[in-house]
């Protein structure tokens, strides 16, 4: 919208019960001849030169061109020369003084009064048009000193802040970044000026500026120690991360061909607000036989990132390398090739998981474990180094381990070891997640699961392993998925077998997490179908937490709590339907793994088999309650965990399903499989379980296309679920977004 100059109204005060409106400056005339008793002089203000009168929201009022003048009127006739007025004042309708450079935060038409004592006022009218897609972030251009000794005083030297503004108008998109110096600083809630560090702990420097729509803050972690090492140089979190929304919907019609199961319920659909997750992967974390404790998937979860320098790689321990580590873990989206670890999971979780914490200074492996073989490093060596590194960090920075155990399960939440050494796919100098097998107490948590990756993963195109000077967090994002409790969705043995078509965060490091993964992590609640449903609207999955539909087997009996909500068990076998959209976490990072992006959208159908095994009986169970409820023994200790997840997509050796005691044909089971929508005569329409292909737009379901197990028999284990249960539903995609 092109700005236009608006009319300026000049109102004149005349004799009682009389008046007139002048829209232009009065013209000069001769002085009228009147008697002294008839003369009535009046000084009237008018605008001699107009300022800018049309603005967009959040712009500054500009009065630099405003010129105010006055003419004297006698009996409503101008006399004398015009007078330029400089000592006027401008007020709004509430009599508030209006200053030049005022931020125009609200849209609409505004009439400001220009006045001076002894003069008749005039009116300045402006109009403020709306700005859209508005967001502001406070960025740190340069950091102050972040590592202090006890007794030292905080120094702001080196701190430079930038206020970034993004908005759209009818004239186009505007991105502005300006340096700001007018801000407040607090440390742990106290004024940062002359703040003296007296505690051995991490401190939070909070910087706040007045944004256009309110205060904006960013945090920097400071450490106080008896040593000179720095910790968490720019570990920060903010609430400015947003994701793009959409009103696009997919519509489904679901018909049930199942026989009545004898239940009295006539409800055929439980919407997401009528459903509770009975279990999440957090429950499994406490009850699995491997004693593997995952990090929390919700809340403010602290990470302790420790860079370990292997012998011979001391020259790689530079400030640039340290900054890359810190950026990949805690930076902004714009600082990396895709997302940082923190920004990715904040967005993927719909703001429910906020990774905080920081990066320690370098520590030499020879200092931690002088006798360890760091050249031919074993898995036991990596676990030992992770344990020793944690002890070193706690001692060096005087950290309280309880501060890193937010779920109070006796283990430190987020532990990452970043080693300085060449990566080698044939050795343990690779990227993976593992565990020490240890479990501590609430009062003394210890290291259990940990992430392990080299610095080269953070600056390489990992597919080609050609060194690049970039910040790339793809590997640590994937491995943190394991830290959260997710498995790999690709085959370890058959390179051609990939049940999700090579396109998922836990399959080839692309895409967002699929709806099943998000449900395990407790980020989304599904809509659960128990009968025929007509014209069900479903938001695209990239944008709405409640945009998933679950279809269980025919013999599924809903468990309803006292509030009337369905208690959904994700550790079961069922179908998942959502709508894929090429937005947000689904749009970037493809070139790194040489994959073709899905530039479109459509319906997705997944077959999930997430049933658990009771390790005591060797049988799959439909109800994990007995597995998740650990009974106290006579000695006061809890019984041995006995929950096991034997069904996976890995399809390899000892990980094959039959090695857990299941029948040999169970090796065809997958934890999650994308059902290809290629159809109606296409050879992939009836794709057997043993085959796959790279996922494409043709795998997405289109408008008016239908799905049922009977139509896709070879993508299932014999026209039924793996359990043998029937699922007699037919799903028709009535509408699929086309944007």
Image: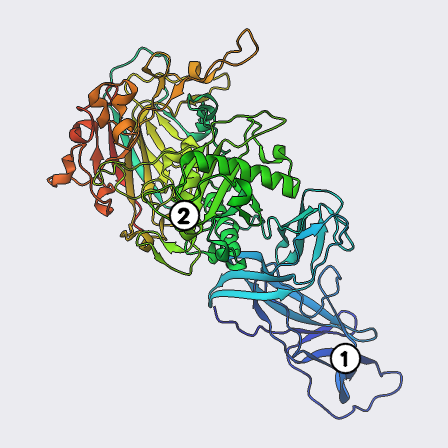
User: In x, y percent, where is residue 34?
Assistant: 83, 88
Q: Quadrant of residue 394?
A: top right
What colour scheme has been applied to the protein in the rendered image?
rainbow
Q: Which residue is mark 2?
A: 246
Q: Quadrant of residue 663?
A: top left
| SS at circle 1 | loop
Q: Which residue is mark 1?
A: 86
Q: Residue at x 60, y 72 (%)?
A: 53
Q: Nearer the viewer, residue 190 or 665?
A: 665
Task: Single out the residue that lies furthest toward the front.
Answer: 371
Task: State whether residue 91 is above or below residue 387.
Answer: below
- Whole-number angstrom distance, CA of label 1 to CA of label 2: 51 Å
User: In x, y percent, where is residue 458?
Assistant: 43, 52
Q: Is residue 308 left or right of residue 713?
A: right
Q: Nearer the viewer, residue 517 or 632?
A: 632
Task: State whether residue 162 is above or below residue 341.
Answer: below
Task: Single out the residue that lies furthest toward the top.
Answer: 634
Q: Nearer the viewer, residue 106 or 322?
A: 322
Q: Earlier in the sequence, mark 1 or mark 2?
A: 1
Residue 437 visible in image: yes
Q: Nearer the viewer, residue 141 or 540?
A: 141
| SS at circle 2 | loop
Task: State whether residue 73 is above or below residue 717.
Answer: below
């Amino acid at each position: 919208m092109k700005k236009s100059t608006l009319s300026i109204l000049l109102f004149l005060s005349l004799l009682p019960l009389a008046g007139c409106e002048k829209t232009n400056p009065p013209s000069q005339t001769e002085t009228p001849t009147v008697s002294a008793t008839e003369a009535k002089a009046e000084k009237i203000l008018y605008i001699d030169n107009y300022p800018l009168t049309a603005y967009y929201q959040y712009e500054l009022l500009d009065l630099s061109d405003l010129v105010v003048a006055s003419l004297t009127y006698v009996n409503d006739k101008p006399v004398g020369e015009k007078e330029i007025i400089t000592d006027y004042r401008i007020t709004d309708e509430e009599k508030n003084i209006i200053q030049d450079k005022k931020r125009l935060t609200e849209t609409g038409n505004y009439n400001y009064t220009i006045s001076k004592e002894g003069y008749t006022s005039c009116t300045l009218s402006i109009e403020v048009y709306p700005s859209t897609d508005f967001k502001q972030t406070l960025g740190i251009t340069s950091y102050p000193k972040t590592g202090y000794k006890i007794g030292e005083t905080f120094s702001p030297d080196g701190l430079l802040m930038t206020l970034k503004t993004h908005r759209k108008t009818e004239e186009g998109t505007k991105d502005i970044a300006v340096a700001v110096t007018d801000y407040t600083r607090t440390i742990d809630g106290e004024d940062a000026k002359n703040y003296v560090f007296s505690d051995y702990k991490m401190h939070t420097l909070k910087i706040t500026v007045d944004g256009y729509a309110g205060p904006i803050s960013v945090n920097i972690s400071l450490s106080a120690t008896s040593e000179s090492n720095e910790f968490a140089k720019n570990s920060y979190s903010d609430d400015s991360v947003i994701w793009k929304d959409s009103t696009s919907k997919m519509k489904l019609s679901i018909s049930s061909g199942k026989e009545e199961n004898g239940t009295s319920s006539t409800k055929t659909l439980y919407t997401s607000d009528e459903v509770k997750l009975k279990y999440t992967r957090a429950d499994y974390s406490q009850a699995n036989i491997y004693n593997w404790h995952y990090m929390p998937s919700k809340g403010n979860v602290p990470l302790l990132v420790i860079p370990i320098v292997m012998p011979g790689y001391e020259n790689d321990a530079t400030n640039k390398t340290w900054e890359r580590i810190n950026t990949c873990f805690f930076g902004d989206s714009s600082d990396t090739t895709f997302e940082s670890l923190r920004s990715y999971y904040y967005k993927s979780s719909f703001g429910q998981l906020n990774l905080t914490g920081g990066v320690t200074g370098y520590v030499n492996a020879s200092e931690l474990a002088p006798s360890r073989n760091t050249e031919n490093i074993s898995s036991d060596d990596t676990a030992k180094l992770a344990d020793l590194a944690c002890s070193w960090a706690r001692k060096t920075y005087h950290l309280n381990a309880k501060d890193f155990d937010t779920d109070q399960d006796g283990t430190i939440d987020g532990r990452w070891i970043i080693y300085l050494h060449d990566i080698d796919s044939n050795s343990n100098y690779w990227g993976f997640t593992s565990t020490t097998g240890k479990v501590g107490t609430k009062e003394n948590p210890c290291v259990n699961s940990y992430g392990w990756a080299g610095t080269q993963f953070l600056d390489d195109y990992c597919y080609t392993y050609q060194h690049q000077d970039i910040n790339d967090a793809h590997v640590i994002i994937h491995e943190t998925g394991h830290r959260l409790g997710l498995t790999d969705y690709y085959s370890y043995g058959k390179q051609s077998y990939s049940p999700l078509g090579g396109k998922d965060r836990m399959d080839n490091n692309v895409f967002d997490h699929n709806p099943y993964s998000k449900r395990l992590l407790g980020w989304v609640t599904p809509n659960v179908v128990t009968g025929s449903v007509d014209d069900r609207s479903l938001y695209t999955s990239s944008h709405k937490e409640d945009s998933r539909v679950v279809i269980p087997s025919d013999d599924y009996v809903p468990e309803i709590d006292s509030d009337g909500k369905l208690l959904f068990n994700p550790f079961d076998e069922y179908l998942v339907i959502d709508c894929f959209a090429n937005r947000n976490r689904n749009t970037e990072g493809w070139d790194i793994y040489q994959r073709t992006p899905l530039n479109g959208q459509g319906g997705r159908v997944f077959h999930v088999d997430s049933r658990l095994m009771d390790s005591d009986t060797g049988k799959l169970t439909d109800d994990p309650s007995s597995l998740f409820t650990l009974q106290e023994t006579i000695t006061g200790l809890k019984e041995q965990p006995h929950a096991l997840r034997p069904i996976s997509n890995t399809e390899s050796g000892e990980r094959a399903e039959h090695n857990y005691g299941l029948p040999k044909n169970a090796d065809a089971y997958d934890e999650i499989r994308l059902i290809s929508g290629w159809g109606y005569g296409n050879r992939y329409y009836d794709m057997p379980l043993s085959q796959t292909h790279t996922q494409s737009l043709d795998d997405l379901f289109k408008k008016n296309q239908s799905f049922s197990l009977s139509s896709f028999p070879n993508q299932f284990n014999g026209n039924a679920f793996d359990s043998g249960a029937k699922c007699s539903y037919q799903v028709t995609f009535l509408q699929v977004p086309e944007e």
